Image (spheres, rainbow, N blue to C red):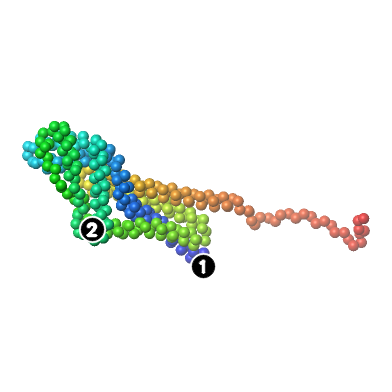
Amino acid sequence: MSPRPRNALSAVLTALACLLLPCGTLAAWVAYGLADTGRYTTAMAPLAADPQVREAVAVAVGDGIAREAGAGPLDGAMGPFVRDAARSFTRTEAFRAGWDTANRTVHGAVLRALRAERWEHRPVTVDLARVTARVKDELARDHVPFAHRIPVRHIEITVLPAAQTDRLRKGYHVLDIAGRWLPCAAVAFALAGIAAATCRRRAITATGLGTALGGALLLLAVAVGRRLTLTALPGPPRRPAAAAVYDALTATLRTASWLLIALGLAVALASWLTGLFLRRRAPVSGGPPAPSSAAEPRPSPSSPLPP
């Protein structure tokens, strides 16, 4: 094959590899990062000490308990006490244990719905009765009026509506397959592009730069997704807590993006320095011919031979 078609084929394969690599990283993060209950719980555990998350939980739990206790004078009298007790509860070890348990329960319920072999059109729900019981005990120990009247019921909270569950189930199966095969396809295309190039060192440099660019685009996508997620929330009070949750969940993805940038730049720099070193070590060709030594005079036939 002539050099021009080989270089064109190498450019196409390299571009495909650099495009598939960030997509494969994103799919693998969803399939093996978010879809692992242990990793998810570990990532969410530090948020139990985050002030914004604690405040959001305290407000949500306090308002929910106040509504369950009844309306009218009872609600007005208990409101401040309930919220203060909920804030106090979020600073205890019991809250941290409950936070981990709740995250593990919610994540397990979502995963079971996404991985279900039989697709059932129903929402994903969890029961938060244990949280209500813990807060009720805190109120009773603090001698809060009407605390004994708080009902502890098995109330199922909808985590995902049925329509959203169906869409996420289809997307999860696609990402599960993509997370397995896209990284392998990206590596295969990169190796094929390097092998097809007439100047492999230049192809390696292009592959490294494309990998770094893909990592940068992935970082940009994470930042844009964060902004869109926070903008879609109904009100500013929930945004700080949602931002903390988003940052905790995408920490691994951001780390993988920076690794792609560092790896790509390192490969490109190493390839460029190797080419520069080889060019300096190469001998200079096409110079003037070396001067030849003067020819010695040959003795004539008539001259006597030296003794």
Point out which mark residue 191 bears.
Answer: none
Residue 210 at x, y percent in the picture = 43, 54
Quadrant, the C terminus = bottom right
Q: Nearer the viewer, residue 297 or 199?
A: 199
Residue 17 at x, y percent in the picture = 42, 58
The type of residue carrying mark 2 is Asp
Up-down relation of residue 2 to residue 291 (above or below): below
The type of residue carrying mark 1 is Met
* Location of residue 116 by image quarter: bottom left
Indicate left or right for 73 with 212 as reference.
left
Local secondary structure at mark 1: loop
Mark in front: 2 vs 1: 2
Residue 264 in view: yes
State the residue at coordinates (51%, 52%).
271
State the residue at coordinates (48%, 65%).
5
Residue 223 in view: no
**Upstream in sequence: badge 2 or badge 1:** 1
Q: Nearer the viewer, residue 94 or 25?
A: 94
* Location of residue 297 by image quarter: bottom right
Q: Nearer the viewer, residue 43 or 296?
A: 43
Indicate left or right for 202 with 214 as reference.
right
Point out which mark residue 166 bears.
Answer: 2
Residue 73 at x, y percent in the picture = 7, 37
Residue bearing mark 1: 1
Indicate left or right for 229 with 12 as reference.
left
State the residue at coordinates (14%, 45%).
153
Local secondary structure at mark 2: helix
Residue 29 at x, y percent in the picture = 34, 52
Up-down relation of residue 89 to residue 23 (above or below): above
Q: CA distance from mark 2 to mark 1?
A: 50 Å
